[in-house]
Amino acid sequence: MDETLERPAVHWTHKVLELLYWRDVRATGLVLGCSLFLLLSLLSCSIISVLSYSALALLSLTLSFRTYRGVLQAVQKSDEGHPFKRYLDQDVAFSKDVVQRHSDVVLSRINGALKELRRLFLVEDLIDSLKFAVFLWVLTYVGAWFNGLTLLILGLIGAFSGPIVYETHQVMVTAVVFRLKLCVINETTKGNLLNELDGFPSENTCSVLLSVK
């Protein structure tokens, strides 16, 4: 991929990692709280209702603050101007270069996903297609247990709690993962040895099995 296409992706990846690792507690808390509120609201209301009520709540806050500042300036006979003037003067328009860079990145991701799906569904590699079939089969059970919003809520909580927990308890988590890998390797080794023995054990092979335990 071209270096110019990678820059916005790297920039946004850095911003997301800062949020997930709670580098700015206020920003992370705000993003997490708003996201959880939105998802929990969608469990009981339609997306149109949630967006409408959220917009009304935001508009009520800005109207109340605008009215309060206007009354305060009238009482104090001051001329501080519009309370949101700093934000009104900011440029919120997207430049063509920014839109072009991000659209190129999104397009490259979509093209890559389409090529991968074509390869899996047309069975270019039998093993990969079988793995994909098992993955889809597992998803049918996941869909029977949870709906999409529940999975999004659990995924959101895991995304904001998992990295900081791992960073805090990295040594303990690494030790547990290492032990699990050793257990998997031991069980795999035992299975391979049993397949090679083919039901005819001897003194040497039994000693090998005992040494694996």
Image (cartoon, helix red, strand yellow):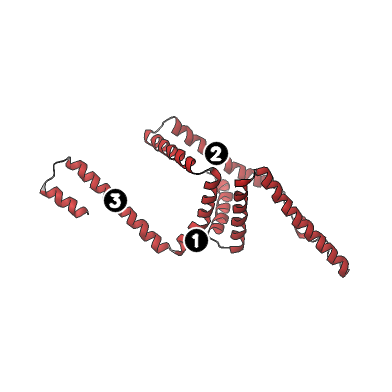
Residue 121 place in picture, x, y as percent: 45, 31
Q: Residue at x 53, y 47 (%)?
A: 150
Q: Which residue is mark 1?
A: 164
Please say if 208 is above or below 167.
above
Q: Tags 3 and 1 in contact by the CB under 8 Å rule?
A: no
Q: Is residue 196 left or right of residue 56?
A: left
Looking at the image, tell me whether mark 2 or mark 1 is earlier in sequence order. 2
Residue type at mark 3: give it: Ile
Q: CA distance from mark 3 to mark 1?
A: 29 Å
Residue 93 place in picture, x, y as percent: 72, 49
- Frontmost of labels 2 and 3 is 3
Q: Which residue is mark 3?
A: 185
Residue 74 visible (yes or no):
yes
Q: Which residue is mark 2?
A: 110
Residue 89 visible (yes or no):
no
Q: CA distance from mark 2 to mark 3?
A: 37 Å
Q: Residue at x 30, y 53 (%)?
A: 183
Q: Is residue 101 left or right of residue 195?
A: right
Q: CA distance from mark 2 to mark 1?
A: 31 Å
Residue type at mark 1: give it: Ile
Tell me the quarter of the image containing the C terminus.
Answer: bottom left
Q: Residue at x 51, y 58 (%)?
A: 161
Residue type at mark 2: give it: Ile
Q: Tags 2 and 3 in contact by the CB under 8 Å rule?
A: no
Q: Secondary structure at mark 1?
A: helix
Looking at the image, tell me whether mark 3 or mark 1 is earlier in sequence order. 1
